[in-house]
Amino acid sequence: MVGYLMKGDKIPDSDNIARFCRPMQVIEGEIQATAFMLRKDEESLSVNWLEFLKCSDIENEIREIQRIYSATLSVSMNARIAILNVGEMRNIVRTESPDNRNIDVLHDPIPDGDQSHSGIYNLKPDSELIAELIVEVIRENHPARYE
């Protein structure tokens, strides 16, 4: 990350993102594809850019994401955080989807709010196959609730 970061900047393939997964998107601790499906009124899938947080390690990044979620969302006991590598996610979607979909992960900070907020773009509301591909590359799965 060099220079000033702006809304719409692409998140590098080497970086990682976190996705908040509601309890209805988790079965027995396992994150389901529904966690990566757009709702009809959404332009992008909301995620958080971990490297933007400038924490010393993944444990501190997870704690900071949990803190952000607890401040902005109603986080129940069964909610989870999916951790994904941007490049792995983009690659599997591009190589395994029938239309060779090229998804983008763009920085989308919330004014006067969560500056790590970002979005996965070029999804479609009915992209169940894409969601299933994304679930395959989840690197880590953590509790979303800040304890």
Image (cartoon, helix red, strand yellow):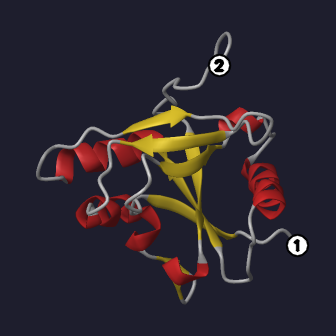
Q: How many marks?
A: 2
In the rendered structure, which amino acid carries the disc numbered 1? Answer: Glu
Q: Nearer the viewer, residue 46 or 91?
A: 46
Name above or below for residue 46 compared with residue 5.
below
Tell me the SS state at disc 1.
loop
Q: Which residue is mark 1?
A: 147
Nearest to the observer: residue 94 or residue 57: 94
Q: Residue 40: where, in percent of width, then height?
A: 37, 60
Residue at position x 72%, y 50% from top? 58
- Distance in Å between CA atoms under marks 1 and 2: 31 Å
The one nearer the camera, 74 or 67, is 74
Find residue 101 and report its image quarter. Answer: top left
Quadrant location, the C terminus: bottom right
Q: Residues within 10 Å of mark 2 (few under 14, many from 20)?
A: few
Element class at badge 2: loop
Residue 82 at x, y = what percent? Answer: 56, 62
Res. 128 image quadrant: bottom left
- Residue 126 locus on image (x, y percent): 26, 63
Task: Pinpoint residue 109: horizontal percent, then vertical percent.
Answer: 66, 35
Spot the residue most to the right. Answer: 147
Looking at the rendered image, the quarter that the N terminus falls into is: top right
Q: Is residue 109 above or below residue 136?
A: above
Direction from residue 127 to residue 36 in the image, left or right: right
The residue depicted at 70 percent of the width and 33 percent of the height is: 52
For residue 15, side relative to residue 126 (left or right): right
- Pointer 2 residue: 5
